Amino acid sequence: MLASVGQFLLILSLVTATVLTILPITGYFKNHEALMRTGRPLAYLLFVLTLATFLILVFLFVMQDFSVTYVWQHSSLTLPLRYRITATWGAHEGSVLMWVTVQALWIAAVARYSKSLSLSQISRVLSVLGIIATGFLAFVLFASNPFEITNPAPMDGRDLNPLLQDFGMIIHPPLLYFGYVGLSVAFALSVAALIGGQIDEKWIRWSRRWTNLAWAFLTIGIILGSWWAYYELGWGGWWFWDPVENASFLPWLAGTALIHVQAVSERKNAFRGWTVLLAIIAFSLCVLGTFLVRSGSITSVHSFAADPFRGIFILVLLGLYAGGALTLYALRVNQLKSTDAINLNSKETLLLANSLIFITATFTILIGTLFPMIFEALGKKISVGAPYFGLMFFLIMIPMAVLLPLGVQLKWHKDSMMPAIKALIPHFGIAAVLTIGAYFLFDGLNLRATAGVFGGFWIASTTVAQLIQFPGKMNASFVGMSVAHLGVAVFLFSMSMTEHKDVEKDILMKPGQTSQVAGYDFNFKGVSVVEIENYRAQQGTILVSKNGAKVVELHPQKRFYPKQQQPMTEADIYPGLTKDIYVSLGEQINEQGDWAVRIYIKPFIRWMWFGGLMMLAGAVIALFSQRSKRLEQRQVDEVMKNRLELS
Amino acid sequence: MTPTRKKRLILVMMVAVGVAIATAIFLTAVRENINYFKTPTEVATGQYNSNSTIRLGGMVKDGSVQRVTDSLKVRFAVTDFEQDVLVEYEGILPDLFREGQGVVTIGKMGQEDVFIAEEVLAKHDENYMPPEAADALHQAKNKGDFE
């Protein structure tokens, strides 16, 4: 019954999105003000409808309505309430519905916070966002309907995949989607500007804050995904270059290029075409990512729905959005000609270099991700190993790390290279000394780790100096940028340590046995059985000590979920300031209670995520920039004035 | 040549050199890290490059899993029901590794026709077979039908 209401609301949402696609833009072309004015209310209506649809699905899970196919497939009578709620987005249908709901929220937010845009501008933006919502709502309704009914309803459900019964599942997907979908705003703005045939700094200033916000969400979504994979998958890795991880990383890279180029194109009539193109690329990569995840066309730990029809559906959407936008771009690009000249010795040049570096990284990873598909079309099955991505990314990030401080040091418009470089040279020395110190402190580092640690110190040293050196620049955008760049430094350092100084040991342990790993003693006290909520677990007890003093007692589990007949490894981690001690159970080897035990020491791994959080914080701080607020207020006043004059 | 043109020429040449170097690095990195997927039949009949890492996929043969006492070394056969390949692996097997289940092993062919796996993958879903393993079985089955 309630499912039919959900179904009905879903159809209404699709209709509303379609109307939103058509009406405001028609108004724009016919210069019909009343039609253009329909954009905002339609946007709010769309959000209310999709949110209601989504909440109904949540409610169906809470109520355990097993007449709904999607519910019984991913829930069960024994599933705790919190996971029944998160199960809503635990599989394909619900997660696409959440995608659309989050997008509707962005659309409503755009409608609400766009006072500085004129009516003709906002009507175009909302219509373009409407096209995207329409496509994905159609996808939900026709290819992944969560409200399908099973008759007769089963007595119990199949339960949620144990890996998803976790805190990470509650927050990682929603935040990632906020970022993913948020990039659609920058995309819509670009397309709307192309339709109008002109793009000025007001457009870019307005879109810049949205892009920043979307980028911040994407950053936190990726960090949470990495952290979750680390503790939940039980292999202790934090990044696998898995196609689905790449799917979230690609828009992030393109988005990073975009936010840096926007800093230029907001100030000058330069790189405007490039800004527009990057926005199109970033969002297209989001849709491509959705395709990779949903089509199951690439082998991945994530691919849960291997359904060719769904794959083709999204591919068609991708073709429509990316193809349409690029065609429009090709038609209009000569109207976006830069009028301001760019001096080679200026911040602008370095920001352009930044975007080129990041877009190179994007395409290198894209090629590696798509290679298996290309080969498969040729009848060969291959996979591209993680070392490819690791090496290529490392090489591409070298110029990034080297040039970053120079880009901050150089002034806008016109500067000279030599004084800027001279100002930075002392920091080169500081970074070198610190790196040598780290080399001896951590008993030697390999080439890549040395480079990474040096890069971290180099960026940190220069960024701190620049913060002190330019007191006049102490505004939110400069502080935000500096915090984000310090985050890059922290990330480079800790990632190099985690990747190259970690210790990984698989050991056969007998009860009572003590093994030494990296200076710690691990005393295995055996395994006992515990029953918790909806699973049974074999729980190991491992006493970790150093030089006879107890550090911690860890309890890794091998869980068994009877409903799914599926075992799961739950690691236990002792998180430390400078290192994590990570222990998980493999399998019982024999009747005497010997177990295969995995013991990892991961130096500085928390710092890596902390670096990511600093990048996020930087993006958020920059949102409070007085300069952009002042400029935006001026724009609002202008729009108001025009409106008064018209009436 | 005017100074502007000269500047442009230098710029173009620098870009060209950069692109060439990048392409060279890219091709090397790709070539070294592409892992071909092979079925047990292909491996058993020698259709592989013994120097490169390959992915061998199929079913874990029933009754083939053997542990070496007092170590984490394990041996098992991967089969497509046409041919078997003996695989050796030292370490912790994935949760869903089981006899009669699909598996993908990544490694190199070693001595005496034993495949030395560095990594063993089993899919995290009971109903789901790694696509590569499914494909290996499918190929072998088709071949059997033709014969």
Image (cartoon, coloured by chain):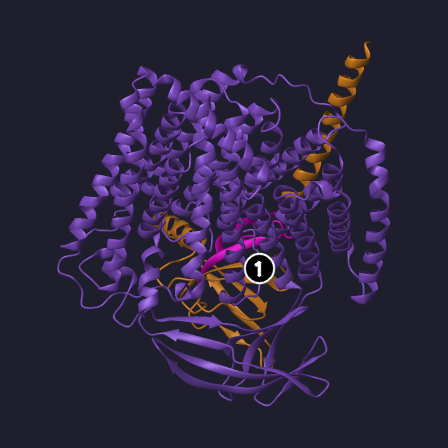
Chain colours: A purple, B orange
Q: Residue furthest top?
A: B1
> Which corner quadrant of the image does residue A240 belong to?
bottom right
Q: How many marks?
A: 1
- Chain that bears disc 1: A
- Please say whether residue B35 is one of the residues in the magenta stretch: yes
Reply above or below: A548 against A300. below
State the SS at label 1: loop
Reply above or below: A212 against B145. above
- Classify the position of the N terminus of chain A by image quarter: bottom left
Tell me the residue at 20%/62% (across/down). A66
Where does the magenta region start and end? B32-60
Residue A244 seen in the figure: yes
Picture coordinates of residue A341 (x, y %)?
Answer: 68, 19
- Classify the position of the C terminus of chain A by image quarter: top left
Picture coordinates of residue B121 (x, y %)?
Answer: 50, 61
Tell me the residue at 43%/28% (across/down). A117
Neighbourhood count class around disc 1 (C-alpha, 10 Å): few under 14, some 14–19, many 20 upward = many
Picture coordinates of residue A478 (x, y %)?
Answer: 66, 42
Reply above or below: B97 against A469. below
Residue B131 seen in the figure: no
- Please say whether residue A477 is one of the residues in the magenta stretch: no
Q: Which residue is mark 1?
A: A238
A402 left or right of A296 in image: right
Picture coordinates of residue A311 (x, y %)?
Answer: 37, 41
Reply above or below: A188 against A507. above
A110 left or right of A16 in image: right
Q: Amino acid at mark 1?
A: Trp
Q: Nearer the viewer, residue B138 or A481?
A: A481
> Which corner quadrant of the image does residue A533 belong to?
bottom left
